[in-house]
Image (cartoon, coloured by chain):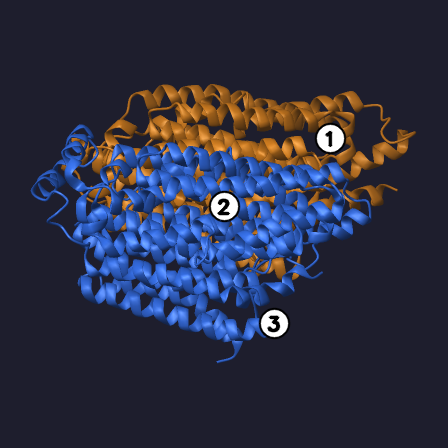
Chain colours: A blue, B orange
């Protein structure tokens, strides 16, 4: 197959999964089996594609003309390819995990669940390969809509309220700000195509847009891309945690939030252009907005006892790292941002998998109840520890490298621009890493070190806590932490894989660096 | 045959309407009117194709040459409007029979089909005629038949709503007629093109600078009267009050038809009036109509959307939403750019399809649940999955989410505003479409998250004969969401023609 055909295949495969999911809805094993096979195929196709793209070959598909002057068109550059690889690779593991999770929780409407999942992956692939802002926007909106049924999967009042916040914030930002930004960009630049070096740079030198206007425009993008969860528009992310854990895992560690920061990076590199952001000081405010956001999110995360909300706030913080990388707009920071998309995806998905596995095995949602669970679930908590290292940015976690490049980016910017206030951001990054340690490491520590004797407390707490619903109650009662053991294999294997991957990535960082290097040149 | 298409579009339903009454059997009447409606649609498609290929088509009735005789004119704009009006009428009629059986008393059903075709005649007549007085005549034909259609229902409140509409509608029609009379007084002709030419000549004869003609005041009054009259017909804020009641209490089938067609036709006449008869300078500079209408359209968009949010009756939600959506069309018309005008034209089409689909969904629910109160729809997502999902899809179109037709029109309007660099208005546009999210999603939440109401528990899925047309329209909406060659493409061509006419008229005058 030619690369262009591979691209089309890569876009079509999630839709084929959707079709199979519908056709085989009568037989659960057949349905889930085909999904996994299609997911593997997608990953395989993407690796073939990657070989071409990283070889700096042009791979494109002109798609369809939607309106005169606006096409749905695809053209792959390294950053998008990397994102597609991550999303498709983790889709395989998540599907396996979701099968285990959904079945042991006896969740209803599994067909709808896996169907929406496939659409979300389709949207992520479209976004990754998009040739212009218009296509990316369409994919972005498609993802919002397709994930709404996933977020509200349980159909309870709580789910409805969560879904309301989710859809409300994502729609109002994307329609209210992002769409406006697109129209404005088109008006200024006359095109929406991504171009290395930026499409606005030329207009700026020609005087068609002033620096102040650029700052406003960047603001429209930064806050319009609600999925990047820059504070204060982060509220949808914790709200979306009402979803079943596999959804939180893939969507809120990989696809949805990463589409957001991917969008931000694309805007920085291909719309504004690194040089423009650099020279015009357009993005200085955004650096600080991201810096504040990442510190605040980490602080809030420390106060959360519910494991999933803690992870949600942690995600908000880590997303701000990528936004910071985009805003700093130095070669190293862009590479750091792009790399952090990968590292954080692998690390965070592991953490969510672990949270889900713990819930499946013990029906515990709160950190304070997890004392001594480590002995019962050594693999889960071991994986948790490894992934925490990755998120914090300590070797041997892959996150060490991305954070290193981001920190270098701040220094680079400070040195090059001669403005020493950028060192504040370096400090912010360091402090944030410490905060990450403070909210992540205690979890495996409690699980391994504390003895489960006190779990009388835990059970009391569990009884006070109305959240575990009645059908689970007896389940919880008949096993205090000793009898249970690990979650089903289908849950444990994927999380071990991703934890190992986060370590492998520590050694593969050089490869990612080489891949991303071309996009930092202009 | 091809040359006779413009008149055939009007004559076929006109003759068929009374013929309906002659057929005794209800089934037979239905089949007959269905055939007529689809035949008309087929004709309108052929007309559109002809016009797009070979340009404007003019037809002299009785072979009397204009301006003495009456002519029908089909240019891209009128052919396009005629196409979707007859298309929607055909689609709604295909959907109708089950609802008609339930909603309209058996002894009145033959009147229903007859009036339906009469209404269609009037609407198509308005779009195709090239004679201003004729517009008034057809406007009355369509209005009178719609007053009657609204009052056909079993709901007694429909009579009052119909009466209200009759009073206000008659005032509107009278205003329009006064305007026509004044224009006739100045120019001595009723043919649109002729009026336009003579107005230009007047400018030259008396003009120093641009417009200094003796009868300026008469002309201004004429334009003002006609605009207000049309404003009433298309329910522009603040003269929209008749619409929510009329839509709400009319039988559901009737609402489908009216919501999809009648207000759009009034917008069409406004475009004709501003771009085809009066010059842009006259409409927009001499009379500061532009800013007033833009202001009114935004006020309309916001107040009506807010009103929609707080309704408990789903038909009222949609009715207020129609008032709001109409604001977008009026806005586009008044931007005086190719982009803005094509946005308005394409939104006429897109909104017709979307609103038609939504009211069809309402009809499905009404049939099965016997109620259009939001409260009674609670939890219907499980019992009536296809109907509920149709609401979600069509609702996404109404919001203007990408990959639906609604996005195309909003994006075009947004680009038009960006072109003018009126960022304040652009901001207002995007914010207003967020209000649509609220009123659409309110219903979605009720459908999917509530405990099923008693009525829902007793109900079953809507019949296939109604779901198929509904999903047909939704499919059309989706297709024209990412392939716009024949929606936006034609709209752009129509807008270009209108703007050309406007500039050409000027040049002729020089």
Q: Position of residue B389 (x, y in %)?
A: 31, 45
| Chain for disc number 1 | B
Q: Position of residue A197 (x, y in %)?
A: 70, 57
Residue that numbered label 1 is attached to: B283
Residue that numbered label 3 is attached to: A58
Q: Which mark is residue A198?
A: none
Q: What is the CA distance from the residue labelled 3 to the residue labelled 1?
A: 52 Å
| Chain for disc number 2 | A
Q: Position of residue A199 (x, y in %)?
A: 70, 54
Comparing B335 with A59, the one in front is: A59
Quadrant housing residue A386? bottom left
Question: Which quadrant would the C terminus of chain A be assigned to in this image?
Answer: bottom right
Give the label, 3 or 1, closer to the camera. Answer: 3
Q: What is the CA distance from the residue labelled 3 to the residue labelled 2?
A: 29 Å
Give the label, 2 or 1, closer to the camera. Answer: 2
Q: Position of residue A409 (x, y in %)?
A: 63, 51
Comparing B362 with A2, the one in front is: A2
Comparing A195 with A112, the one in front is: A195
Q: How many marks?
A: 3
At horizontal 61% and vertical 40% (from top left) the residue drawn is A425
Task: Give the left or right position of residue B412, taking residue A104 as reference.
Answer: right
Task: Give the left or right position of residue A470, taking residue A397 as reference.
Answer: left
Let me know if marks 3 and 1 both belong to one chain. Answer: no
Give the label, 3 or 2, closer to the camera. Answer: 2
Residue that numbered label 2 is attached to: A319
Q: What is the CA distance from the residue labelled 2 to the residue labelled 1?
A: 53 Å
Instruction: Say if residue A512 shows up in the picture.
Output: yes
* Mark 2 Cα shell of 10 Å, populated few (<14), some (14-19), many (≥20): many
At horizontal 39% and vertical 23% (from top left) the residue drawn is B310
* Mark 3 Cα shell of 10 Å, populated few (<14), some (14-19), many (≥20): few
Q: Secondary structure at mark 1?
A: helix
Q: Tell which circle, 3 or 2, labels the residue nearer the N-terminal end.
A: 3
């Amino acid at each position: 197959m030619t690369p262009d055909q591979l691209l089309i295949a890569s876009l079509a495969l999630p839709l084929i999964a959707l079709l199979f999911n519908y056709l085989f809805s009568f037989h659960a094993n057949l349905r889930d089996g085909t999904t996994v096979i299609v997911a593997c195929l997608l990953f395989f196709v993407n690796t073939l594609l990657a070989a071409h793209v990283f070889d700096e070959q042009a791979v494109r598909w002109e798609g369809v003309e939607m309106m005169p002057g606006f096409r749905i068109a695809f053209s792959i550059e390294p950053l998008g390819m990397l994102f597609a690889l991550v999303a498709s690779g983790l889709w395989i593991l998540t599907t396996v995990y979701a099968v285990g999770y959904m079945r042991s929780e006896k969740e209803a409407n599994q067909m709808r669940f896996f169907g929406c999942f496939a659409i979300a992956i389709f949207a992520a692939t479209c976004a990754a390969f998009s040739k212009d802002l218009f296509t990316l926007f369409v994919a972005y909106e498609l993802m919002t809509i397709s994930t709404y049924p996933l977020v509200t999967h349980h159909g309870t009042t709580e789910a409805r309220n969560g879904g309301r916040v989710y859809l409300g914030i994502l729609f109002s930002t994307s329609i209210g700000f992002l769409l406006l930004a697109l129209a404005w960009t088109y008006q200024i630049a006359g095109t929406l195509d991504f171009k290395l070096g930026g499409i606005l740079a030329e207009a700026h030198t020609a005087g068609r847009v002033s620096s102040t206007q650029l700052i406003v425009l960047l603001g429209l993008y930064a806050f319009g891309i609600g999925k990047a969860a820059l504070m204060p528009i982060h509220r949808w992310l914790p709200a979306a945690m009402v979803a079943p854990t596999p959804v939180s895992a893939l969507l809120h560690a990989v696809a949805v939030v990463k589409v957001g920061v991917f969008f931000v990076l694309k805007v920085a590199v291909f719309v504004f252009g690194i040089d423009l952001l650099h020279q015009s000081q357009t993005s200085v405010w955004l650096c600080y907005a991201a810096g504040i956001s990442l510190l605040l999110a980490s602080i809030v995360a420390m106060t959360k006892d519910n494991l999933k909300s803690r992870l949600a706030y942690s995600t908000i913080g880590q997303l701000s790292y990528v936004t910071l990388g985009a805003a700093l707009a130095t070669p190293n920071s862009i590479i750091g941002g792009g790399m952090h998309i990968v590292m954080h995806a692998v690390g965070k998905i592991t953490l969510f998998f672990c949270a889900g596995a713990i819930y499946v095995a013990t029906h515990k949602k709160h950190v304070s109840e997890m004392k001594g669970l480590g002995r019962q679930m050594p693999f889960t908590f071991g994986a948790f520890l490894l992934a925490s290292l990755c998120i914090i940015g300590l070797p041997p976690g892959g996150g060490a490298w991305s954070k290193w490049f981001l920190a270098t980016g701040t220094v680079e910017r400070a040195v090059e621009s001669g403005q020493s206030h950028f060192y504040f951001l370096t400090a912010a990054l360091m402090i944030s890493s410490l905060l990450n340690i403070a909210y992540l490491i205690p979890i495996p520590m409690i699980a391994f070190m504390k003895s489960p004797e006190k779990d009388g407390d835990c059970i009391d707490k569990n009884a006070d806590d109305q959240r575990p619903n009645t059908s689970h109650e007896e389940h919880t009662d008949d096993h205090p932490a000793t009898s249970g053991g690990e979650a089903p294999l289908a849950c444990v294997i994927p999380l071990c894989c991703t934890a190992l991957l986060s370590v492998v990535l520590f050694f593969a960082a050089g490869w990612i660096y080489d891949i991303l290097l071309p996009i930092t040149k202009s | 045959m091809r040359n006779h298409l413009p008149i055939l579009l009007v004559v076929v339903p006109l003759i068929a309407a009374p013929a309906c009454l002659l057929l005794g059997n209800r089934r037979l009447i239905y089949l007959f009117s269905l055939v007529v409606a689809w035949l008309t649609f087929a004709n309108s498609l052929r007309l559109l194709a002809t016009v797009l290929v070979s340009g404007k088509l003019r037809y002299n009735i009785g072979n009397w040459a204009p301006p003495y005789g009456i002519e029908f004119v089909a240019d891209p704009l009128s052919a396009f409007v005629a196409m979707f009006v007859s298309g929607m009428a055909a689609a709604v009629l295909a959907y109708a029979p089950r609802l008609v059986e339930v909603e309209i008393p058996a002894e009145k059903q033959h009147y229903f089909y007859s009036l339906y075709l009469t209404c269609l005649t009037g609407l198509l007549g308005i779009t195709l005629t090239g004679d201003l007085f004729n517009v008034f005549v057809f406007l009355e034909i369509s209005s009178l038949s719609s007053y009657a259609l609204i009052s056909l229902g079993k709901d007694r409140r429909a009579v009052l709503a119909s009466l209200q509409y009759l009073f206000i509608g008659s005032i509107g029609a009278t205003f329009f007629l006064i305007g026509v009379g004044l224009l006739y007084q100045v120019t001595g002709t009723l043919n649109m093109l002729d009026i336009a030419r003579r107005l230009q000549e007047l400018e030259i004869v008396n003009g120093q600078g641009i417009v200094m003609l003796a009868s300026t005041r008469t002309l201004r009054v004429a334009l003002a009267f006609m605009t207000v009259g049309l404003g009433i017909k298309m329910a522009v804020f603040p003269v929209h009050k008749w619409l929510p009641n009329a839509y709400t209490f009319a039988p559901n089938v009737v609402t489908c038809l009216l919501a999809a067609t009648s207000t759009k036709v009034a917008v069409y006449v406004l475009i004709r009036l501003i771009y085809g008869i009066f010059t842009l300078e006259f409409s927009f500079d001499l009379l500061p109509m532009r800013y007033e209408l833009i202001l009114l359209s935004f006020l309309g968009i916001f107040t009506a959307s807010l009103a929609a949010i707080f309704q408990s009756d789903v038909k009222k939600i949609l009715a207020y939403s129609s008032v709001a959506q109409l604001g977008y069309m009026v806005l586009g018309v008044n931007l005086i750019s190719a982009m803005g005008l094509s946005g308005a034209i394409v939104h006429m089409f897109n909104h017709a399809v979307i609103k038609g689909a939504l009211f069809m969904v309402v009809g499905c629910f009404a049939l099965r649940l016997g109620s259009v109160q939001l409260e009674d729809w609670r939890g219907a997502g499980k019992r009536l999955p296809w109907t509920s999902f149709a609401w979600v899809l069509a609702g996404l179109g109404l919001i203007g989410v990408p990959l639906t037709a609604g996005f195309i029109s909003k994006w075009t309007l947004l680009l038009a505003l960006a072109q003018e660099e009126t960022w304040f208005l652009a901001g207002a546009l995007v914010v207003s479409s967020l209000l649509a999210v609220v009123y659409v999603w309110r219903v979605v939440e009720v459908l999917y998250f509530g405990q099923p109401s008693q009525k829902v528990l007793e109900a079953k899925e809507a019949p296939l004969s109604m779901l198929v047309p509904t999903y047909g329209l939704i499919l059309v909406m989706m297709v024209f969401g990412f392939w716009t060659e024949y929606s936006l493409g034609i709209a752009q061509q129509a807008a270009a023609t209108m703007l050309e006419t406007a500039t050409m008229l000027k040049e002729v005058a020089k």
